[in-house]
Image (cartoon, rainbow, N blue to C red):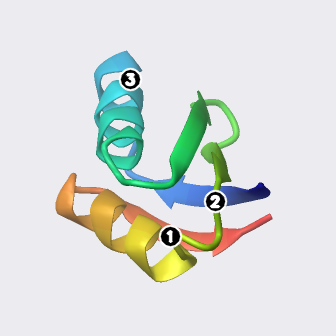
Amino acid sequence: MAKISLIVEGMKCGHCANSVKEALGSLSGVNNVEVDLDNKLTKVDFDDALIDFADMKEAISEAGYKVVGTK
C-alpha cells in the first residue's frame, strides 16, 4: 500500500471535491481518497503495483482539474 498527497488546482467547492474523489475512486488500485479543499490537497491510498502517479494525474485532468505537484 502506498500513499501520495497531490496538490490539485481548480477545486473550489464540495462538488469539485466529489468530482476528484469519484475520478480517482473509479481507478483500479485506488483504495481511499480524501480531499482537503482549504489546502488544495488530495490524499490517495493506492496499490502501486496496479496504478501510478501518471494514471492518477490523467484521471484528475479528465475531470477538469490540474495536478500541480505532490506533497
**Tally of marks:** 3
Q: Nearer the viewer, residue 55 or 57?
A: 55
Q: What amino acid does circle 3 point to?
A: Cys
Residue 69 placement (x, y as % from top left): 64, 74
Does 4 sit left or right of 56 as displayed? Answer: right
| Residue indicated by mark 2 | 47
Between disc 1 and disc 3, whose residue precedes? 3
**Quadrant position of residue 17:** top left
* Marks 2,1: beta carbons within 8 A: yes
Of residues 26 and 66, the one drawn nearer to the viewer in this rendering = 26
Q: In the rendered image, which residue does mark 3 sit on?
A: 13
| Residue at the spot of label 1 | 51
Disc 1 to disc 3, how far (Cα)?
Answer: 27 Å
Lower position in the chain sequence, tag 3 or tag 2:
3
Which amino acid type corresponds to the residue marked 2 in the rendered image? Answer: Asp
Q: Is residue 68 visible?
A: yes
Query: Label 1 sits on what residue type?
Result: Ile
- Nearer to the camera, 19 or 33: 33
Give residue 2's quadrant in the image. Answer: bottom right
Q: CA distance from mark 2 to mark 1?
A: 6 Å
Outermost residue toward the bottom? 54
Q: Is residue 36 visible?
A: no
